[in-house]
Image: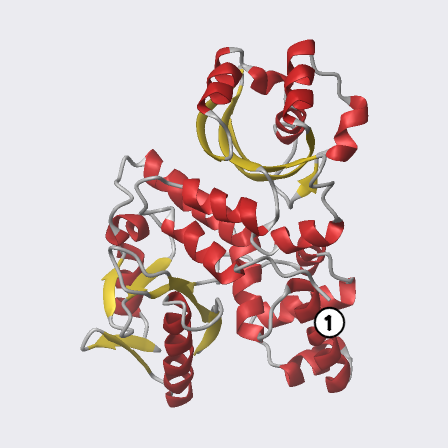
Amino acid sequence: MALVLQNEPDLIQALYRSLTHREGFHTFLEKLTNAIKGCAAQLLVINRQPLRMEHLWYHGLSEEFITWYLENNMIAQDVVTNQAVKQAPGLFQAALPLLPDFQPDEDYSKWENEQDMLDSAWLLVDTTRTHSFVLTIQRTVAQGPYQQAELDALNRLVPHIRQTVQLYRQLETRNQAASSLAAIIDVLPDATFVLDSMATILYSNKAARELIARERCLGIRDERFRFAESDVQSAFFRASAQVVRSSMGKEAYCSETLFLKREGRSPLIFVIRPIESSDLLAGGALVSAYETDNRPLPRAEHIATYFELTPAEAQVCEQLVSGKDVQTISEQLGRSVSTVRSQIKQVFQKTGCSRQGELISRILAALLR
């Protein structure tokens, strides 16, 4: 059975709240540390050349330690940092296996011994041409090393962490305040809409307005989505209601995916994710519309690697993401319907998802570029 983090829906909501919270990621790091039974956590912005820390959000560290760490540029002695800046973004890893080949100086070793540090779960969240964004969660000797089941549980958060940090970085790059939902979505390249707790459209970015103007399969009337197909309209109503409820903490975290058919073209992919209750909104949903005619969808080999699936399971996921139903997948892959359903069930168990729409949303958040 997959390990479940304490208050996982609350963790995800706290993560997205970081975009508009005046303290940034600090509250999320506190909740994350407690959920995985760590002692401290940091989200670092690192300049790779020369190697130095440019920004820090943290929990569980004293001001005295942070001052010493910065003044002595101890990041150059950090085993996680030295490994993270050499690789591409991926999943959570344990620091303990790195230690035998790492030789820090006397001051760094002294600090580790004084703090009784044993292990760290670390994630290279994102990279730019010059910077790396690294998240670490430390544990003491008494708390013990990280087990694979715990890393797997943390990995369920990775798509959400990566998306939030990318949003934060885009906002920072454009010098726009993160206190406005309109400012957040205006920097996104995909058509994006913000719904309030009544599923009314509050904001839409330029790409969204252009999409509505040219597509016949959907429109907006009375500040609500209107779809050409009645079954899609009903599906959106059910999905948006459930997602909005989850945004207000009335249900477990829920995301959903809908496919809008377009004659002679690939379907339009509608992904609906919750926006947590905050000072700006009493709950709501973020709706992203992905057009894939000139944008390749995640391939089976990438899905298999990222989510640790078998090639057969990943092939089914690739078909699901492209909008195929189970019967069509069965015919195209030459497998029985029962086999395809069984493989989807296995994927649910490995990813922690419970519905196809949630699974597709998670794959797109992690791998669509």
Name, please, the residue furthest toward the left.
222
Label 1, residues with CA under 10 Å away: few <14, some 14-19, many ≥20:
some
Residue 73 image point, x, y percent? 54, 14
Q: Tell me which corner region of the image, top left, top right, bottom left or bottom right, holds residue 353.
A: bottom right
Q: Which quadrant of the view contains residue 88?
A: top right
Q: Position of residue 160 (x, y in %)?
A: 50, 53
* x 47%, y 49%: residue: 163
SS at mark 1 in the image = helix
The image shows residue 210, relative to residue 100, as above or below, that is below
The x and y percentages for residue 302 are 67, 54
Relative side of 292 to 95, left or right: left
Residue 210 vs residue 32, the one in the foreground: 32
Instruction: Work out whether residue 93 or residue 132 is closer to the camera in this orientation and state it.
Output: 93
- Three-letter amino acid code at the position of disc 1: Gln
In the image, what residue occupies the spot 30% across and 57% down? 278
Give left or right: position of 138 versus 254.
right
Q: Residue at x 40, y 67 (%)?
A: 249
Instruction: Pick the quarter of the image with the N terminus.
Output: bottom right
120 versus 367 height, above or below: above
Please say whether residue 130 is visible from this viewpoint. no
